[in-house]
Amino acid sequence: MQADITIIGGGMAGAAAAYFLSRGAAVVLLEREEAAGLHSSGRSSEQFTVGISADTMRRLAQASRPFLENPPGGFAPLPLLASRGCLTVGRADQQASLQRLYGRLTGVGAEARYVDRNEALQLFPALRAEKFDSGVLEPGAMDIDVNTLLQAYLRGARANGAKILTNAGANAIERKSGKWIVTTPVGEVVSSMVLNAAGAWVDDITRLAGLAPIGLTPHRRTAFTFLPTGIDASRWPHVSNVDYRWYVSPRGDSLVGSLADAVPVPPGDVYPDDMDVAQGIENIEQDTTFKIDRPLSKWAGLRNFVADKNPVCGTRVEAEGFFWLAGQGGCGILTSPALGQAVAALMSGRELPEEQRTLGLTAEALSPSRKELQS
Ligand SMILES: Cc1cc2nc3c(=O)[nH]c(=O)nc-3n(C[C@H](O)[C@H](O)[C@H](O)COP(=O)(O)OP(=O)(O)OC[C@H]3O[C@@H](n4cnc5c(N)ncnc54)[C@H](O)[C@@H]3O)c2cc1C
């Protein structure tokens, strides 16, 4: 099979890239599993926030907001975002951290305001009043409909002529006569360019192509759901403490909770660790009035980071025609529109979209060759 671009990986990154790239190129997307989105992209907390500490990631979040709020006509059958808000609380001795968060949000043009203890308790009545003094509210934080977004990218890519192949893992990658040849159980794909969007497996794919890894480390995070007893918490904001020892986020009638853990692990299918669930419950019960006897469900997923915790989007001089879209950490859903647009621009030899440059984003800051990633 021939294509202009072969994308390896059918998570949110590969799907977004397929959507934006297929507007101007013949694209084949290869996913090893029987369906797209079975790994990190199907295991997230479904949150849109701009309160992110890594600078490039935060700018990409803000750059993604217009697409998610107002996607092109016919892109998705349902709204992609729903109002939620994000409340971060801290003690008096943690004011510097809350101020940093406030500065990060307003620095990229996101709305933020300080709230005192009373207002925080009105917003999230299950907080224990004695455990915090004030907070920062990001009213523009949202819930993302992750499945609708993923399916919309894939449907849009197919409508543009892209081929989405499942059960089609890349087993070998070769460079021959200026082309990349990717071998899969369903045949070979020959293309001028390859996009490595294989999530936690990005460095495995890089090595398969005979190139030096970008230094990606998957980090496991465990989450669970529980039912609040006797209260309707469905309209409450996402909440966490400022040193990020736990978070809680309403999802339908239940709540998602997590220890906000980040345990380095090899790439693979990951499962929830009972100790992490128990510690998450303990931390949440210390700072809130929730009593979590037994979680309704639990799961774990991978958040993949390179050294500076910013994403990688671009190529390297020695890797002609081979591009990376990786290292989205805990933000790969919410940054997918901006990263999809960025990779489409860079793979077509264009500069980043103007809206991204206005926010201070540069190809250098996204590059796999940036100095922050050299050891
Ligand atoms: C608990 C948790 C909470 C999170 N919360 C949020 C959140 O609120 N908001 C947010 O934006 N992000 C969140 N994230 C992060 C987000 O889920 C990830 O950043 C995002 O899903 C990464 O997408 P991806 O496409 O890079 O990876 P993946 O979804 O893992 O996709 C990579 C794909 O590559 C495929 N693949 C691997 N090897 C091969 C091969 N050889 N050939 C073909 N295919 C291959 C895999 O099967 C996989 O489907 C969270 C993550 C976790 C774990």
Image (cartoon, helix red, strand yellow):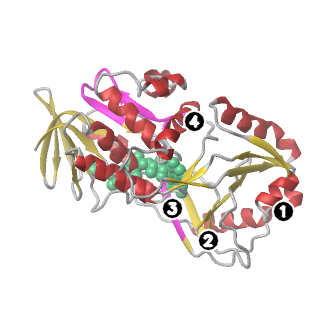
Give the residue pinned by disc 4.
58
Question: Does residue 300 belong to the magenta stretch?
Answer: yes
Label located before the other in sequence (3 or 4)? 4
Estimate how packed mark 4 is, as few (under 14), some (14 to 19) or many (20 or more) residues with alpha carbons within 10 Å. many
- Viewer-nearest of discs 2 and 1: 2
Q: Which residues are magenta?
A: 298-324
Label pair 1/4, CB-CB below 8 angstroms = no
Q: Is residue 25 visible?
A: yes
User: Based on the displayed image, in which of its 4 quarters is residue 351 positioned?
Assistant: top left
Do callouts 2 and 3 mark residues in contact (Cβ within 8 Å)? no
Find residue 104 and name its label. none
Measuring from the top left, give residue 127's x and y in whole percent: 80, 62
Q: Secondary structure at mark 4?
A: helix
Query: Which residue is found at the position 31% from the left and 43% from the top?
Result: 19
Task: Tell me how far mark 3 sits from mark 1, CA to CA.
Answer: 27 Å
Query: Is 54 situated left or right of 164 in this image?
Result: right
Residue 313, given in percent of the width and then of the height, sits at 40, 32
* Distance (Cα) linking label 2 and label 3: 18 Å
Q: How far apart are labels 2 and 1 at the CA level?
A: 19 Å
Residue linked to disc 2? 254
Which amino acid type is marked by label 4?
A: Arg
Task: Say if the magenta span includes residue 170.
Answer: no
Q: Quadrant of the N terminus?
A: top left
The label on residue 128 is 1
Please state which of residues 294 and 266 is positioned toward the viewer in this rendering.
294
Instruction: Residue 2: give x, y in percent of width and height.
Output: 11, 40
